[in-house]
Amino acid sequence: MTIRPAKKEDLPILLDFEQKLIEAERPMDVTLKTEKISYYDIGAYIDTENTEVVVAEIDNTIVGSGYGQIRNRQDFFKQKQIGYIGFIYVKEEHRGKGVSQKVIQYLYDWFKTKNLDEVRLTVYEKNPRAIKAYEKVGFEKHLIEMRINLKE
């Protein structure tokens, strides 16, 4: 398995991964629109210095993705910036092979080159498989976001 920075020519595959990710998450979030949506500006992310989009390849085939992004913090936090991980996707037939762990480890190493001490991500509570995968690479639950629909 190889983890490498994404290139512009990877964009069609990455856009497909994004739609598959949204399709998987849509049942977990009733607030998402039903028409086609996009979470990320992957093409722009590939070109920016504060974001590292990566792909996982097995036998020269892209099987997974993720990105790391440097984000500014509010003044009341100790760190001025933190790392944020998103767009973790692995093709179904390659799940359970450590692909996401390798992608995340690559991003940890990238964050270290940027002198960042902390990395965060968000995950749906109704996605226990993803939560377990993130816990395997050291993440701990930190905040709980809550919602209410006042029309229901």
Image: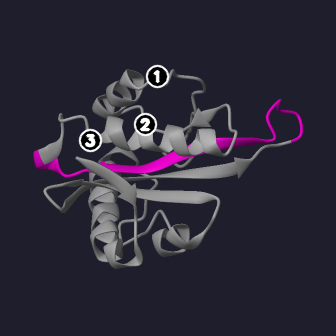
**Image coords of residue 65 (percent x, y):** 34, 54
Residue 90 relative to residue 83: left or right: left
**Mark 1, residue position:** 138
Write the residue at 33% across / 67% down. 14
The residue segment tinted magenta is 75-93
What SS does tag 1 mark? loop
Write the residue at 35% across / 66% down. 34
Image: 114 above or below 138: below
Q: Residue furthest right?
A: 75
- Closer to the chain start, of discs 3 and 1, is 3
- Closer to the chain start, of discs 2 and 3, is 3
**Image coords of residue 112 (percent x, y):** 61, 38
Amino acid at circle 2? Gln
In front: label 1 or label 2: 2
Write the residue at 57% across / 33% down. 146
Q: Determine the CA span between mark 2 and mark 3.
A: 10 Å
Q: Determine the CA span between mark 3 and mark 1.
A: 15 Å
Q: Is residue 109 magenta?
A: no
**Mark 2, residue position:** 105
Image: 45 above or below 137: below
Amino acid at circle 1? Gly
Quarter of image, res 13: bottom left
Residue 148 relative to residue 71: left or right: left
